[in-house]
Amino acid sequence: MAEPLKIGVTGCAGRMGRMILQAVLQNADFRLVGGTVRPGHVSAGKDLGSLLARPDLGLDVTTELKALIPHVDVIIDFSSPEASLHHADLAAAGKVALVVGTTGLNKAQEKKLAQAATKIPLVYAANTSVGVTLLMVLVERAAAALSPDWDVEILEMHHRFKVDAPSGTALALGRAAAIGRGIDHDRVAIRQRDGQVGPRLQGSIGYAALRGGDVIGDHTVIFAGPKERIELAHKAGGREIYAEGALRAALWAHGQKPGLYSMRDVLGLV
């Protein structure tokens, strides 16, 4: 029987961090080695069990990822764009595989992740859900099959606490549509509309973001054509799907060659 994969979780006190801690503890294929938070965080120095309302696990919440790296096989990171880049540098220096599920990274930050991936296997996904990954494949194929007079609009809704918009998943879906059409996403993306914006530009990819309540994540890609419309959608029923996908990515990444990978690589959908 193979040894459990040793996992370290950054941003472990956050909403997704706690979910990943729970998923690791519930899966015999993995062993939780430790978790980190930013310096000064109220959870620093406490036992990891306290984050989950569980008995002590004998593992402290630390602010020092560098000290944790020699003891892990894979780091799972759902933190912030700036923190993820720092964690990627540390993982690359320590030759440890990394799974990044952080959203809101800009193009320059994504390039820095790619630099770290020249030294380690790094899975970067705006959404680690298996269902969303399949949706991206379907969107790309639909965009390739439909003529340019089918307008592409992306609607997303999340809980009131989400800080970035459009969501990283929405943008990834838009990029999938752009790839299918063979166009430059950033050139055609319309990320907001307000006032007298004029008629819709043909070939553009539009976005609309809704925020409210406790919605985990709803995404709909609308292909609006002459006299008919196609809608491809995914609705998240629980954050467990992201944690389960992240663990699947960690299991796949361990032992891979250095490179920047996506959930499509993890699922064999490339």
Image: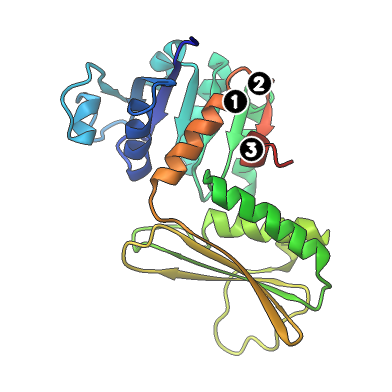
Q: Which disc number belongs to residue 256?
A: 2
At x 53%, y 43%, the residue is 128
Local crowd size for mark 3, using a 10 Å CA cut-off: few (<14), some (14–19), many (≥20): some
Query: Contact (CB < 8 A) between labels 3 and 1?
Result: no
Give, as a three-letter code, the residue at label 2. Answer: Gln
Query: Cα distance, mark 2 to mark 3?
Result: 14 Å
- Considering every residue shown, the one lying at the far front of the view is 1
Q: Tell me the crowding category of disc 2: few under 14, some 14 to 19, or many 20 or more residues within 10 angstroms, Cα based.
A: few
The figure's colour scheme reads rainbow
Give how far apart the Cα atoms at labels 2 and 1 are.
5 Å
Circle 1 SS class: helix
Q: Tell me if I can see residue 126 in this picture.
A: no
Vertical side of 58 occupied by 13: above or below: below
Q: Residues within 10 Å of mark 1 (few under 14, many from 20)?
A: many
The C terminus sits in image quarter: top right
- At 39% from the left edge and 48% from the top edge, which residue is drawn? 239
Q: Residue at x 69, y 60 (%)?
A: 139
Q: Which mark is residue 150?
A: none
Mark 1 and mark 2 in contact (Cβ < 8 Å)? yes
Q: Given contact means CB atoms under 8 Å apart, are the residues at marks 2 and 3 in contact?
A: no
Numbered disc 2: secondary structure:
loop
Q: Amino acid at mark 3?
A: Leu
Q: Which residue is mark 3?
A: 267
Q: Secondary structure at mark 3?
A: helix
Mark in the foreground, 3 or 1: 3
